[in-house]
Image: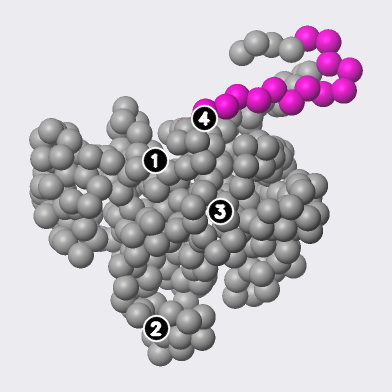
């Protein structure tokens, strides 16, 4: 991992965001995802590296592109592991709603947890609460601790939770504690990372979402110094999703064991999910959100809004890039 590679990683998410954004609002979530996958794969192939996808598209159904174990890059240069979500929030993109982005995490070889295509219970919080809140506590206990860490009243805290049936009791408990709930339909990576920055209005992420996105969130929060914990969810009765209609608890446990995960109830810290010496998070907005503007198509250019967080130089860079079209004659500053 080096600074030149980080710049190329930024271009990977920018190209994926542009490809998806061309289909924003057309109701074509699968097509938008496929366009982002292809754009991300194409740009990765131009990088001088020995890249490997450890978290990718379609772990269960062996998707043809960016699947787990796929090798990307030129085959020369540093060994890099990637966790990718080329179009995080496909429904958001399809319906032109806020919060869709192209996102990835990268690390030195072996530096990212090989998360299965399962669900994960997650807890994200600001750096001030790192190591003080704990996913094994009740929501009420964690919010009391968070209130003390941030010097805010419980009534001033906003907790982001995925709007799912499985979270009905969690949402009731949060509101009963006096804190506010901000439900989101999709896209909990951006919500988790927003907890790492003050001024976003988001103080905590709680609840169950996709495990691969949990690893990407952990990479960003580790680089930011924020708090992130994840615990795999393997019981369909807890996940409460139609996607697991044909899965059983026993079958899921067997799948975890096959992947070498024997401590199935382990609580993972950010430093375990993203353990590499050098860890990079990169995201580019497809639609506008808490951290990004969406892709903007103009007559002479395309404008992207991105964020790169790196442990290599301890930076979080917010970047606006103007991609000039051939023959451009007038490029607006903003």
Dot 3 falls on a residue whose secondary structure is strand
Q: Please identify the dominant SS of the magenta region.
A: strand
Mark toward the start of the polypeptide (4 vs 1): 1
| Magenta-tinted stretch | 316-330
- Distance, label 2 to label 3, CA atoms, is 24 Å
- Distance, label 2 to label 1, CA atoms, is 30 Å
- Distance, label 1 to label 3, CA atoms, is 15 Å
Is 322 covered by the magenta stretch? yes
Which numbered dot is residue 224? 1
Residue assigned mark 4: 317
- Relative side of 332 to 161, left or right: right
- Distance, label 4 to label 2, CA atoms, is 38 Å
**Quadrant in which residue 210 is drawn:** bottom left
**Other residues around mark 1 within 10 Å, as few (<14) / some (14–19) / many (≥20):** many
Residue assigned mark 3: 107
All told, the count of numbered labels is 4
- Taking the spot 59% from the left edge, 61% from the top edge, the residue there is 109
Residue assigned mark 2: 262
Q: Are marks 2 and 3 in contact (CB under 8 Å)?
A: no
- Relative side of 98 to 125, left or right: right
Residue 5 higher or lower than 165, as above or below: above
Mark toward the start of the polypeptide (2 vs 3): 3
- Distance, label 4 to label 3, CA atoms, is 18 Å
């Amino acid at each position: 991992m080096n600074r030149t590679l980080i710049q190329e990683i930024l271009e990977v998410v920018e190209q994926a965001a542009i490809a998806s954004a061309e289909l924003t609002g057309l109701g074509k979530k699968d097509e938008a995802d496929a366009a982002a996958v292809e754009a991300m794969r194409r740009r990765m192939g131009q990088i001088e590296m020995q890249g490997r996808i450890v978290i990718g598209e379609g772990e269960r159904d062996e998707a043809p592109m960016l699947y787990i174990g796929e090798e990307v890059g030129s085959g020369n240069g540093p060994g890099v592991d990637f966790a990718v979500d080329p179009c995080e929030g496909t429904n958001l993109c399809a319906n032109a709603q806020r919060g869709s982005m192209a996102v990835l995490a990268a690390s030195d070889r072996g530096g990212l947890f090989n998360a299965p295509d399962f669900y994960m219970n997650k807890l994200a919080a600001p750096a001030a609460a790192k190591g003080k809140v704990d996913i094994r506590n009740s929501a009420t206990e964690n919010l009391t601790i968070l209130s003390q860490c941030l010097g805010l009243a419980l009534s001033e805290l906003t907790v982001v939770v995925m709007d799912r049936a499985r979270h009905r009791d969690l949402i009731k408990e949060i509101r009963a504690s006096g804190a506010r709930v901000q439900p989101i339909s999709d896209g909990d990576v951006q919500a988790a990372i927003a907890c790492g920055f003050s001024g976003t209005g988001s103080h905590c992420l709680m609840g169950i979402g996709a495990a691969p996105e949990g690893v990407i969130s952990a990479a960003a929060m580790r680089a930011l110094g924020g708090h992130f914990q994840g615990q795999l969810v393997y019981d369909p009765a807890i996940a409460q999703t139609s996607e697991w209609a044909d899965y059983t608890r026993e079958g899921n446990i067997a799948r975890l064991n096959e992947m070498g995960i024997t401590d199935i109830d382990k609580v993972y810290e950010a430093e375990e999910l993203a353990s590499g010496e050098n860890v990079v998070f990169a995201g580019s907005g497809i639609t506008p959100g808490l951290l990004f503007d969406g892709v903007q198509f103009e007559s002479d250019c395309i404008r992207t809004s991105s964020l790169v967080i790196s442990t290599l130089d301890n930076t979080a860079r917010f970047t606006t890039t103007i991609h000039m079209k051939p023959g451009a004659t007038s490029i607006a500053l903003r």
